[in-house]
Amino acid sequence: MRIRATVAALSGALALSAFAVPAAQADVQGTVSIDKPSAQERFGASSAKSGFAAQALPEVSNVTVNSGKALVFGTTTVRTFEVSLTASHPSGIVDAYMDLWHGTDLDNVDGYLPPNEEAANCTAISATTSNCKLTITASPGLHGDGVGELYANALAGTWHVTAAVQSADGEVYGNDFYQTHKVQRLAKLTTDAAPEPVNAGQTISVTGKLTRADWETGKYVGLSGQALHLQFRATGASAYATVKGIKSTTGGAANTTTKATVDGHHRLSYPGISSTGQAVATGDYVGVR
């Protein structure tokens, strides 16, 4: 059993609470045991030098995951992304730690993406402040013990971001709930406009299909009931404009019609939802006689 320490803002002050957290179990593609370390364990700090003492804790800011962009995973591609933060303390900063974790609370952690490095790459920008960077690698599917793996579709959505730092004199700030970040399933979208070419004013049919990654089966499955946009870009225009909104139906199918007035490209776009990234189909050209 590990002990997790969490720092939260209470009435403008930092309060540290410790939680005894058993390993979380997930019965998807087998049993997965997730054991997430505390900042104190990561830094090897004693409780006397881990924020429990009435001393100034390091201050953390500019916590960034993947340059602020959502993490979107398909069925096979392994991704490595950067996490970073800025920290300061009168004695200076010697190390930092960040991870992403998923669960209802610290007693129920069912997803854990730890950093690759044993120690952060911290660059001092003054005697008291440093910028620190780490990398995290994640892969879809279950290939090992579940750590660093997106083994269940239920893991898609909002993840917690842990931010922790250690000062030169041994003080540790650790917050398992510093902020959140989106980890999403990759969506794919196709478009076909027909017939082509057509006469001016003729109705054309635009069809397509919306699918998204299934992390449990390693396949792409149809996604129904989703809001899509039919868009058009006339030849010579620099951007697409939305023509109308439609919804995907059974199996992710999309079907609609529009009037052809000038030459141009028709496409479908999907804005995404919390669990699923956005997708934009390649435009299909229709010439108008």
Image (cartoon, rainbow, N blue to C red):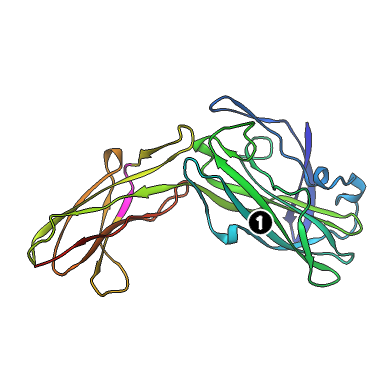
What is the count of numbered marks?
1
Q: Where residue 97 sits: x, y (%)?
A: 75, 52
Q: Quadrant of the N terminus?
A: top right
Depicted 220 relative to depicted 161: above or below: above
Left of 211 or right of it: where is 276? right
Q: Nearer the viewer, residue 287 or 182?
A: 287
Q: Residue at x 68, y 35 (%)?
A: 107
Depicted 163 relative to depicted 38: above or below: below
Left of 273 or right of it: where is 224? left
Depicted 129 relative to depicted 185: above or below: below
Q: Quadrant of the C terminus?
A: bottom left
Residue 56, quarter of picture: bottom right
Q: Residue at x 13, y 68 (%)?
A: 261
Magenta residues (range):
224-228
Q: Where residue 214 sits: x, y (%)?
A: 44, 37
Q: Where residue 49 sits: x, y (%)?
A: 90, 50
Depicted 244 relative to depicted 110: above or below: below
Magenta residue check for 138: no
Left of 140 or right of it: where is 264? left
Q: Residue at x 56, y 42 (%)?
A: 139
Residue named by callout 1: 83
Q: Circle 1 — which element?
A: strand
Q: Nearer the viewer, residue 28 or 14?
A: 28
Q: Nearer the viewer, residue 258 or 226?
A: 258
Q: What amino acid does circle 1 point to?
A: Val
Q: Where residue 119 sits: x, y (%)?
A: 78, 52
- Determine crowd level at label 1: few under 14, some 14-19, many 20+ residues with C-alpha closer than 10 A: many
Query: Would you say the magenta stretch is mainly helix, strand or loop?
Result: loop
